Image (cartoon, grey):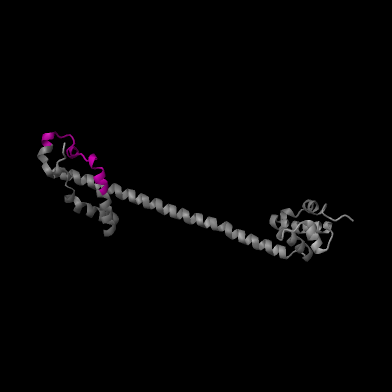
Amino acid sequence: MKRDETSFDVPAQLGVMRRYARSLTRDDIEAEDLVHDALVRAYERRGSFDTDRAAPGKGARDSAQKGAGQQGSVLRGWLLSVLHNVFIDRRRSRIAEARREADSVDLAETSAAPAQEHHLRLAQVRDAFMALPEEQRAALHLVAIEGLGYAEAAATLGIPPGTLMSRLSRARATLRAMEDGPAAETPNHLRIVGGTDEPSR
């Protein structure tokens, strides 16, 4: 059955919709966007519009006597309800987007912190490395940075392999103590690190 065109006279309700949209948004441009979105949604859901809602509890004859004015009132209420729902959905969407942006900022700041901490730690390690005695620093550089084997590093420095191992052990113990903090500098820790690496005499 074809819908009575007078029951869905949307253009007649545009003024009311625009006024309500401006009241909600307090912005003319945003109000026009809101009305547009509401009209699109109303068109998509036009099948849900029911003119019988005009006079609940009234008979068909009574409703017919109301005529187009009553139907227009029902349409106006329905369109304003659609517009209001679109406004709420848009507001929720913006709030959700704002939260996502805030979370992104927090995540970026959280992600940046480890990088900054990492650079600080590297600077501390570098300073600790440069503070090592020259013989320990040379031994550790050749093995840990240049990748030389123990025998090759010992030969480069002109020292016995046992002496090289002792210097490496002491250098690593110093850097470990810096990394672990005061708790690492216990007598047991130092005894374990340095004991067996001493060259045999």
Residue 74: where, in percent of width, then height? Answer: 18, 43
Considering depth in this image, is 161 or 79 the residue closer to the camera? Answer: 161
Residue 156: where, in percent of width, then height? Answer: 79, 63
Asked if residue 97 can be seen in this view, the reply is yes
Asked if residue 27 can be seen in this view, the reply is no
Q: Is residue 108 left or right of residue 28?
A: right
Q: Is residue 139 left or right of residue 96?
A: right
- Give the vertical position of 84 relative to 167 (above or below): above
Q: Quadrant of residue 172?
A: bottom right
Q: Residue drawn 47% across and 53% down?
A: 103
- Taking the magenta stretch, the answer to whether it contains residue 51 is yes
- Taking the magenta stretch, the answer to whether it contains residue 14 is no
Q: Is residue 32 left or right of residue 104?
A: left
Q: Which residues are magenta?
A: 40-62
Considering depth in this image, is 152 or 164 the residue closer to the camera? Answer: 152
- Give the vertical position of 7 relative to 91 (above or below): above
Q: How many marks?
A: 0
